[in-house]
Amino acid sequence: MKTRIGRIAIVTVAWLAIAILALVVWQTHRAQAEPLDTYHSSWHLVRESADEDGATFAAVYDLTTEGNFASKDSNSVAAGGPFRIVSMRPSSRAEGYSPGSKWKLAFSGKNYNNVDDTFSFNVIGWSKTNGLQQNILEGAGVLGTQAVVVYPDGGDALGELVSETAVTYTHGSLTFTVTNEGFDGAVAGMLAYVTGTNITNGYYQVTTVTDTNNTIMSGISSTDNNTDSTVQINPAFWADTLTIDEKTKYPRDGDANNVQVYNSGADEVAFLVVETTGLEWIQVVIYDADAATGEQAGAISVYGRRF
C-alpha cells in the first residue's frame, strides 16, 4: 500500500512539474511572439538640439577614408551623435524595438532669420560592430509655424529665451522697451512672436538690440503706441516641409517605398518614415543650418519612434 501511495505521489509531482514547465514555456513564447505595442511607442530624442554638424555631409563623413563602424561619431545623442535602436527594454515590453522595423522621424528647430528657415540632412546607419555605414537618404527641410510646445532645452518654446509682458511699444520707431528682466539673450536675426493693443499679432524679426531693455523689429504692423505688448523671442517650430532627393540609398528588396514623406507642405508637422532593417544605429547629420547664414535654421532637433 505504501509503495502504491509513493508511486502515486511521484507521478503526481512529475505531472505538476511538467505542467509548471509547460506553463513557463507557453508564457515565454507568448511574451516573445506577442506583437510590440507600436501604437503606444514613445518618441525618442534621436538628435539633441544643435546647429549644423558641418558645412556639408562630406565635411562630417569623408566616405573616401571613413564609412565603417570604427569611424562612427563617438558623441552621445546629446552632442549630435548616433542613436541606438534598442532591441529589448526590460522595464517595458512596449518600448522594446526590433532592428528590423521602420522608424518615423520628425524635425524641429529655431527660426533665426525669417519664417521658413531651412536646413539639410542625411540619415545614415550601421549594423553591428563591424558594419559598414549605410547612407540611407539625403534631403532638406523647412521650418513651419507650428510651435514646439515643449522644447528639448526646457520650458515653453515660445518663451524659451525671452518672454516679456507689459512691454511698452513705440509705434514711430518700432521699438519695444521693458524694464524688468529685459531682452537679455536676444540677438538681431531672431524671430519674435508679438501681441498687443494696436499691433497685428504675428511673427516679426528682431533687427536691433540696442541694450537689454530695448529692441527694434522690422515689419511691425501697428497703428499706435501701447504699454501692454507681449514679446516672446526665439520660438521653436516643427518642420512642415521635408524633401528627399532621388538618391534613396538603402532599398529593401527593391521596394521603392523604403523611404516615405508624410504631411510635407501641409502646414503641420512633416515626418519621414525610414526603413531600418538590419540596422542597430542611426544618425541624422545636419548641415546648412548654422543660424547665421542666409535663411538657414538653427538648433535642429530630431525625434523618432517605431512606425
Image (spheres, rainbow, N blue to C red):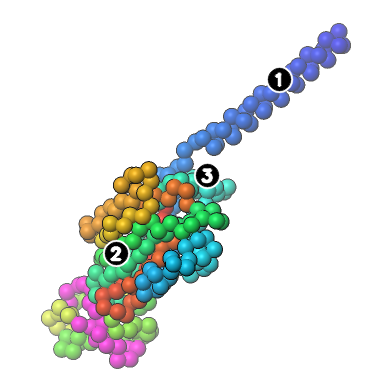
Residue 32 in which image quadrant: top right
From what the image shows, is residue 230 above or below residue 141? below
Residue behind mark 3:
93
Report which residue position mark 2 lands on.
141
Residue 24 placement, left or right of 152: right
Could you tell me the amino acid type at mark 2? Gly
Q: Which residue is mark 1?
A: 15
- Callout 1: SS: helix
Q: Quadrant of the N terminus?
A: top right
Mostly what secondary structure, the magenta segment? Answer: strand
For badge 1, the amino acid type reads: Trp
Marks 2 and 3 sit apart, C-alpha to C-alpha, by 33 Å
Which numbered disc flags the more N-terminal residue, 2 or 1?
Answer: 1
Q: Secondary structure at mark 2?
A: strand
Q: Position of residue 103 (x, y in %)?
A: 40, 51
Q: Which residues are magenta?
A: 198-218
For the point 54% across and 63% down, which residue is it? 70
Looking at the image, tell me whether mark 2 or mark 3 is earlier in sequence order: 3
**Within the image, what quadrant is residue 187 found in?**
bottom left
The location of residue 4, given as percent across then percent down, is 83, 10
Tell which circle, 3 or 1, labels the residue nearer the N-terminal end: 1
Q: Which residue is most to the bottom?
A: 210
Q: CA distance from mark 3 to mark 1?
A: 32 Å
Disc nearest the viewer among 2 and 1: 2
Tell me where residue 221 sits by quadrant. bottom left
Q: Is residue 133 left or right of residue 245?
A: right
Mark 2 residue crowding within 10 angstroms, few (<14) / some (14–19) / many (20+): many
Lateral position of residue 213 relative to residue 205, left or right: right
